[in-house]
Structures are given as structure tokens and as C-alpha cells.
Image (spheres, rainbow, N blue to C red):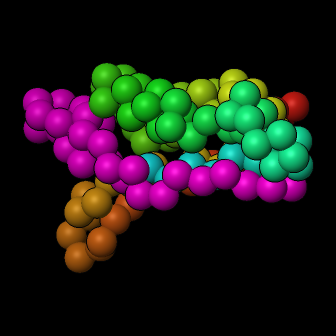
Amino acid sequence: MDKTFIKDLLVRGIIGIREWEREKPQDMLINITVFSDTRRAAASDAIADCVDYSSLSKQIQTHAETAKRLTVEALAADLMKICLAQNGVTRAIVRVEKPGAVRFAKSVGVEIDRARDE
């Protein structure tokens, strides 16, 4: 299966369970990989046959910046729904990270892998 990806999308939003995390937006790093068959898109060279990564990234960014979720697990699940709703996408991997959330760690987060038929 072919892959379309969005790498290191930096967004700012409310995420976390601690009181101070609910007060001001913090950085989140999002990586998305969606799986689809790109042969038709390659043959037609038409955007209508492609996964529109520009539109997808805007949807992901808007949701992540406004959802105000408590956990990265909940946010990742939200973003997964957006990915699997895209035309032609049969599977997706969503990774949500909070850079600097844990002392001495570059980043912490969660990665989920789901198929449309699950």
C-alpha cells in the first residue's frame, strides 16, 4: 500500500491534565501517515484522485489547536477519525508528541495505527 505523509506539523493548543497546562497553549508535534492506492492518481495526475495533504493538514491543525483535550491519546483518536474520513484512505498512523513535557526527554507522546475497517 502507498503512503502519503505529513511530517513534524507543529501546532499550539491546550493539552494536558495539569492546571497550568490548561491555561495556555503549548507546542505539539504531529506526524501523520495515511495509506491509499495512488495508482489512479499517478495515471490521472488529478488532485481529485489524490489524498489532499494540504486539506488534511489544515483539518488536523485546526482540530489540534481547538480541541482542548486532556490526553494525547484522546487527541490522537480524534485526528485518526479525520484521517480515515479522507477519500481513499484505508489505514493511518497518527503520532502526537509533546516536546519538552518530560525533563531530559526531547519529546513524549503516543502513536496509534488503525485501519478503516476496525
Q: Is residue 19 magenta?
A: yes
Image location of residue 106, percent across then percent down: 30, 71
Is 61 positioned to the left or the right of 45 in the image? left
Placement of the N terminus among the 4 image quadrants: bottom right
**Can the viewer see residue 91?**
no
| Number of on-image labels | 0
Can residue 24 be seen here? The reply is yes
Name the residue at 41% across, 58% down: 8
Toward the viewer: 10 or 72?
A: 10
Question: Residue 102, image x and y in percent?
Answer: 26, 64
Toward which corner of the image does residue 12 lie, by quadrant? top left
Of 38 and 91, the residue lying toward us: 38
Q: Quadrant of residue 105?
A: bottom left
- Locate residue 51 relative to residue 29 in the image: left or right: right
Residue range corresponding to the magenta coloring? 1-29
Q: Position of residue 112 (x, y in %)?
A: 63, 49
